[in-house]
Image (cartoon, grey):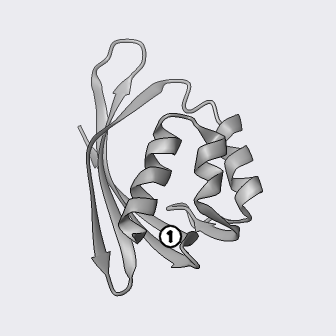
Amino acid sequence: MTVDVARRYCKAIDDCDWATARTFLDPDVEIVRPSGRHYTGADRWIQLLSDSQGFDNIVSEITERAYEHRNGEVVEVKELVHRWRDDGELAYTSREQTTIGFRKGLIARMDSTVEHKHA
C-alpha cells in the first residue's frame, strides 16, 4: 500500500495536480530537500510547489523512476536529465533519492539527497 501511495503522490506532482497530491500527505508532513532545507506542513509544501516556476534556464525531465521498500519505508530513486532551455543541449544529469516515511497511510516524511553528474 505505501508504494502505491508514493506512486500516486508522485504522479499527482508530475501532473501539477496539487489538490490530489495534498490528499496523500499527513497534515504535519516533514520535508527535507537535498539542500538541507526543512519544510513542515502539507499546505505549506503544496503551496511552495504550486508557486514554483522552475529554473529560468534549465528544463528537467525524469528519465527513470523506481520504488522499493527499505527498512519499513519507501525509497524513490529518480534519474533526471537537465537541458539548457535556449538550445536543448545537455547541461547535466542527476540522481535523486527520496526516503518516504508514513503515518496512518499518509506520507509523513520525505528526505531527499541528490548527486549531480556534469555533462
Horizontal arrangement in the rendering, residue 67 relative to residue 51 (left or right):
left
Q: What residue is at 66 percent from the left and 43 percent from the top?
A: 19
SS label for mark 1? strand
- Which residue lies under the disc numbered 1? 111
The quarter of the picture where the N terminus appears is: bottom left
Residue at the far front: name it.
1
Quadrant of residue 33 within the rendered picture: bottom right
Q: What residue is at 51 percent from the left and 43 percent from the top?
A: 12
Q: What residue is at 52 percent from the left and 43 percent from the top?
A: 13
Query: Residue 8: x, y in percent?
Result: 45, 51
Three-letter code for the amino acid on which mark 1 is drawn: Asp
Q: What residue is at 32 percent from the left and 17 percent from the top?
A: 88
Horizontal arrangement in the rendering, residue 68 relative to residue 40 (left or right):
left
Q: How busy is the neighbourhood of tag 1: few (under 14 within 10 Å), some, or many (20 plus)?
A: some
Q: Is residue 66 above or below residue 57?
A: below
Query: Residue 26: x, y in percent?
Result: 66, 68
Q: Is residue 91 above or below residue 100?
A: above
